[in-house]
Image (spheres, rainbow, N blue to C red):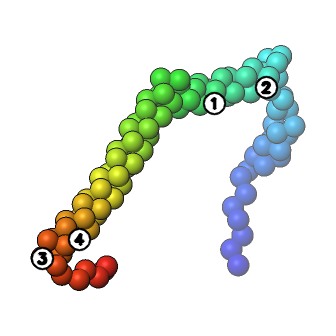
Amino acid sequence: MKEINKPANLDELLLSIENIKVVEIRPFFYSRLISRMNDRKSQQRTVLFNPSYVIAILLILLIINFQMVNLENKTQEQEETANNSISEFAETYNLNVTSY
């Protein structure tokens, strides 16, 4: 196996590691950081739950619901008129009508 080339000043390097100082952070750094992160999260949530958006979505859903109910009523009326016209035609010509 090959030996790893060791630097000539390995002892100096190890001694320099011992002289490294720990970096001090400003007081309340973590509390400020968490506060900023929570502020950003709350700003993102308020856009979706803005009352104007909620009202607009509810109105759109109500309009769609109203249109679906009207469409259902129209199809029922058309079926009834079709059945009535067949019955009237059969009665006019004295024919027996069977329901389909």
Spatial distance from mark 4 to mark 3, Cα to Cα? 10 Å
Residue 19, percent across and down?
Answer: 85, 32
Earlier in the chain: of badge 1 and badge 4, it is: 1
Foreground residue among 9 and 76? 76
Quarter of the image where one finds residue 78 = bottom left
Amino acid type, mark 2: Tyr
Specify whether 49 is left or right of 57. Answer: right
Q: Position of residue 14 (x, y in %)?
A: 83, 44
Q: Are marks 3 and 2 in contact (CB under 8 Å)?
A: no
Hey, what amino acid is under mark 1? Lys
Q: Nearer the viewer, residue 81 or 26?
A: 81
Q: Secondary structure at mark 3?
A: loop
Q: CA distance from mark 3 to mark 1?
A: 76 Å
Helix, strand or loop under label 2: helix
User: For mark 4, what is the residue?
Assistant: 87
Q: Residue furthest top?
A: 27
Residue drawn at (70%, 78%), measured in percent from left and top? 1
Q: Is residue 70 above or below residue 48?
A: below
Q: Which residue is mark 1?
A: 41
Cα–Cα span, label 4 and label 2: 82 Å
> What residue is disc 2 on?
30
Q: Which of the two discs, 3 and 2, sits closer to the camera?
A: 3
Under tag 1, what secondary structure? helix
